[in-house]
Image: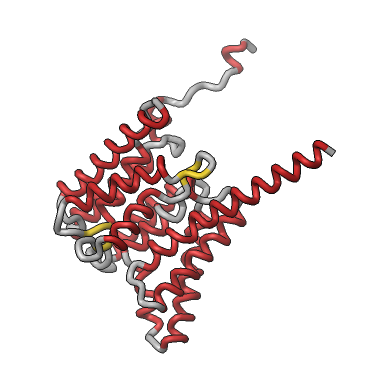
Amino acid sequence: MSASAAQPMEAPQWKRFLSLENRYIAPMFITLILLVGHLSFGILESYQKTLLAIVASIGTELILSRLFFGKWPNIASAYITGISVGILIRSPAFWPYAVCSIVSITSKYVLRVKGRHIWNPSNFGISVMLFLAPQTVASLSIQWGNYLLPMAVIWVLGSVIIYRLKRFHISGLYVPSFLVFAFFRSWLTGSPWQSEIAPITGPMYQLFIFFMITDPRTTVRSKTGQCITVICVALLEMVLRLNQVVYAPFYALFIVGPSAMLIEMWLDSRRASAAGVTVAA
């Protein structure tokens, strides 16, 4: 058999494009989610505001990547951040969409530890805006209602994306954790259990579950660590809800996610030091 015959044939270009290894599959799916939601239920404040968030996100990524690393970046991540901002925040003004995107992307370059950014960009930007400008900015909550069709679209597309990223266990563990803590909240407060579990059936939570807590760049490496982290996010969210914190999931991830990353870095440095001592001995 000749060498050329022994080599595997390359997949056709259209199959490579549709492959789950294509980095642009996730942005395309999220765009499809946006279009389905808006055409069905009018979820966006306006196309212009969402476009502003996307342009601000991509523009900031291009500028900062050139300034910090001297190269042009792949804009897929910035596009996802921009479109997430466009979906998840609500404001009558235009400026929060641009500012939120700029803050989100800037956090990737400024708030770094040992060369890694430790906050999910959109979670950081949205949390900052909700905390600092509550009179102007709110989060997506009931704009989609609890209709099955848009939820089903998010479930299918979100499952495909996180299966590709090997993060399905994170979303799969967060849901039962939320439900357990919801029933516990109901027992503590005496409120109906239906009202405690209702938030997870809304669109904001679907986007949070599939596209925010599963971010590969800002989750710890080990599967065990990822499971512990997501349980801690659900636990802190319960505590915040008991204290009447409106945007509990965003703030819980804002606190727990970076803390888990820092603990992982500390453990890595201890292992490296121990290995160095062993080699020297």
Please provide percent x and percent y for residue 46: 15, 52
Rendered-image quadrant of the N terminus? top right
Please provide percent x and percent y for residue 143: 22, 64
* Nearer the observer, 73 or 147: 73
* Nearer the observer, 70 or 1: 70
The image quadrant that residue 55 belongs to is top left
Please provide percent x and percent y for residue 14: 37, 29
Left or right of 181? Residue 141 is left
Counting labels gives 0
- Does residue 20 lie above or below 257 as drawn? above
Please provide percent x and percent y for residue 150: 29, 59
Residue at 45% in and 73% down? 238
- Does residue 169 lie above or below 112 as drawn? below
Residue at 23% in and 61% down? 137
Can I make out residue 28 in this image? no
For this orientation, the residue located farthest to the right is 281
Residue at 54% in and 52% down? 261
Left or right of 201? Residue 277 is right
The image quadrant that residue 229 belongs to is bottom right
Left or right of 261? Residue 278 is right
For this orientation, the residue located farthest to the top is 2
- Does residue 61 lie above or below 175 as drawn? above
Left or right of 276? Residue 116 is left
Can I make out residue 207 in this image? yes
Rendered-image quadrant of the C terminus? top right
